[in-house]
Amino acid sequence: MAKNAPDQKEENRVVSTNRRATIRYDLLETVEAGLVLTGPEVKSVRAGNVNLGDGFARIDGDQVYLWNVHISPYLFGALHEPQDPLRKRKLLLNRREILRWMGKTTVKGLTIIPVEIYFNQRGLAKVKLALAKGRKGPDQREELRRKTVGRELQREFTGKHRIK
């Protein structure tokens, strides 16, 4: 069977996810964007040396940049070109999407955060961005409390319906 048969659909290979994003923010909408990286950075991302914890995206003029995403320097890379792990990285988005999100972030006070970095079927680095609204402390605690109660109920009901 051919490797790239149209019947087979390969999954995206997720490299890093921002787990704290769903706790700290309410995610309103998501979009996929291309990520401009140098050669050693791509190898480091493939190895999984990425931290999205404090990352955010900012619109500067007509371009979108990813800030505070830590990509560790590739260990086996060339020694003559040191890379800053926290440098801003350009994102590739459609102009319509940039303008639409620019309006939402300036008027409504929303922010753009990275949710996950992955490689698509063609091997290109992509970042999933989310338009998010920050949660306050009581909102975060209420969400955690609701999830905990749901987990306890699930555990209780799974034990009762088993056939012995």
Image (cartoon, rainbow, N blue to C red):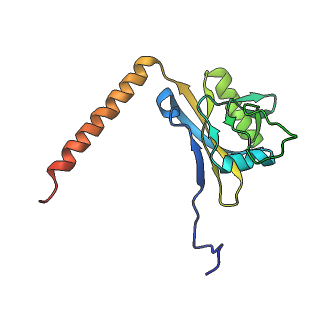
Q: Quadrant of the N terminus?
A: bottom right
Q: Is residue 145 left or right of residue 164?
A: right
Q: Nearer the viewer, residue 97 or 122?
A: 122
Residue at image position (65%, 26%) is: 105
Which image quarter: residue 64? Answer: top right
Up/down of 30 relative to 132, above or below = below
Q: Residue furthest bottom?
A: 1
Q: Residue furthest top?
A: 137
Q: Nearer the viewer, residue 95 or 14?
A: 14
Q: Quadrant of the C terminus?
A: bottom left
Which image quarter: residue 32? Answer: top right
Which image quarter: residue 153? Answer: top left
User: What number of labels is visible?
Assistant: 0
Q: Nearer the viewer, residue 90 or 29?
A: 90
Name the spot of residue 108 as percent of width and height, x first.
61, 22
Name the spot of residue 150 as percent of width and height, x first.
29, 37
Q: Residue furthest right?
A: 80
Name the spot of residue 127 as percent of width and height, x first.
65, 44
Name the spot of residue 51 as percent of width and height, x first.
62, 36
Up/down of 52 relative to 110, above or below = below
Q: Is residue 130 left or right of residue 143?
A: right
Residue at image position (69%, 38%) is: 71
Residue at image position (25%, 37%) is: 152
Residue at image position (50%, 27%) is: 24
